[in-house]
Amino acid sequence: MSLHLLLSHERRMKSIYPVVASEEEMATVAEQGKQESQLVLLVREGGFGLPTACPACLPWFLYLKLSSVSFQTQYSGVEPDSEDLPAVEYGEAVGFASESGGILEFLKREKIADLDAALTEGEKAELESCKAMVESWIVDASLYEIWMRDNDKAVRKVYFAALPMGLSYALDWKQRHSVMQRLGVTTENAKSRGDELLRKAGMAYQALSVRLQDQKLFFGDRPTSLDALVLGHLLFHLNVSLEVSNLREEISKYPNLVTYAQSLKSQLLGGDDGVPMGSAFGNPKAPPPPPPPPPTSTTRQSSSPDTSDKEKPANKSRNEKENSFKKRAKYFVIAQFVAIIMYVVFAGIDFEDDAQDDDGSDDE
C-alpha cells in the first residue's frame, strides 16, 4: 500500500473512531492548562542569597509568600531601567508596579491576596501612616545609598549583570543622575542632603522598632503589607554587599528589627541550606481561577451594544499597557546605544567630579 493510501486510511479511521489520548498526553495537557492559569511574578535577577536582589521587587515576592499564595517567579534582564518591574501576570490580566494603585490594588481586584483585609479601621490608619513613612524617608535614603558612586559594583550586579560592560556602565551613569535629580541632590548640597536622608531613615527605624517591640509581626500574629515592605528593605540592606552601607549600620542599632528580619527570612526563604523552616503562615495555596479571557469578536457582536461599549475601554487600556511594555523590550538595545554615546561624550568632561559630590564623600 502506498504512503498516500496509508495516510488516507489513517485519517478515515480517526474520523470514525474517537482517539483516546494516553495518560502521558492528558497529563501534559493538564500541566499546560495549569501553567496558563498560574500566578507569575516578573522580577529582576536574584543574588546575595535573595530570590531577587531588586529592592523594588523583593517586597512583592515576600508579600505573596506571606499570603501563602502559590506563584511562579520569572526573571527579566531585558529592561533593567524599566519602571514597570515588578509585574504580575494572572491569566489574561497583567498588573504593573507603575500603574495607579500598583500591584497591591491588582491583587485585591483579582481577589488573589489582601493581607490587610482583617485589620480594623484604626489599624489600617496606623498601617498607612507607617507605610507612608517607609516609602518616603526610608526608600529615599535607600535610593541615595544604592546609587552612590562607591556602590557601583553591587548596583551593576543587581541591575545590569546580564548586559555588556559598556552598556552597564552607561546605564549606571544614566540611572544615578536620574535618581540624584529626583532626590534633589546637587553638587553643592550632596553632603548635607545625604546626611539629612540618613537622619530621617534613622528616625523611621526607631519608630518601627518601637512599633514592633518583641512581636513577631507588626500587627500581632497577622502579616500585613507593612511586613512585606519593611522586610524587603531590611533583607536587602542586611544581605546585599554594598561597598558603603550607612543604612546597615543604622539598622544594626535596633536588635529587634534584625531578629525580625532573620527569623522571617528563615521561614519564608530558608536558612543557610536554602530549605525553609516550618512556616506559621500555612502551605502555599493556588489562587482562585483567573477570569475568562475577553470575548471574541463574534461573541461581542452577539452581545448588547451597551455591554460591548463598556468592555472595550478596559480591554483597550490593558492592551495598550502590555504593548508598551513589549515595545520597550523590543527597542531597549537601540535606545541604550544612545546612552553609551552620551556616556562616551560626556563622562570624560565633568561626570567624575559630579559623582564625587553625589556620594557625599568630600575630602575632609
Image (tube, rainbow, N blue to C red):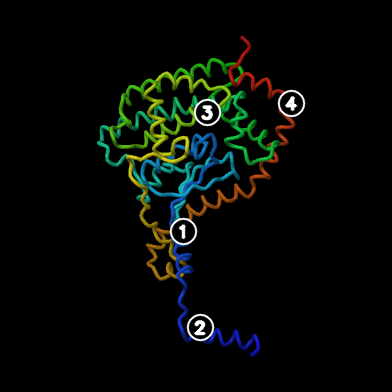
Q: Secondary structure at mark 4?
A: helix
Residue occupying image coordinates x 46% and y 58%: 36
Q: Amino acid at mark 4?
A: Gly
**Residue 99: x %, y % from top left:** 46, 43
Q: Which residue in the protein does label 1 denote?
A: 36
Quarter of the image for residue 173 reads top right
Q: Secondary structure at mark 1?
A: helix
Question: Of marks 1 and 2, which one's residue comes earlier in the chain?
Answer: 2
Which quadrant is the C terminus positioned in? top right
Q: Which residue in the protein does label 4 denote?
A: 348
Dot 1 and dot 4 residues touching (CB under 8 Å): no
Dot 4 and dot 3 residues touching (CB under 8 Å): no
Q: Which residue in the protein does label 3 denote?
A: 143
Q: Amino acid at mark 1?
A: Glu
Give the label, 1 or 2, closer to the camera.
2
Question: Of marks 3 and 2, which one's residue comes earlier in the chain?
Answer: 2
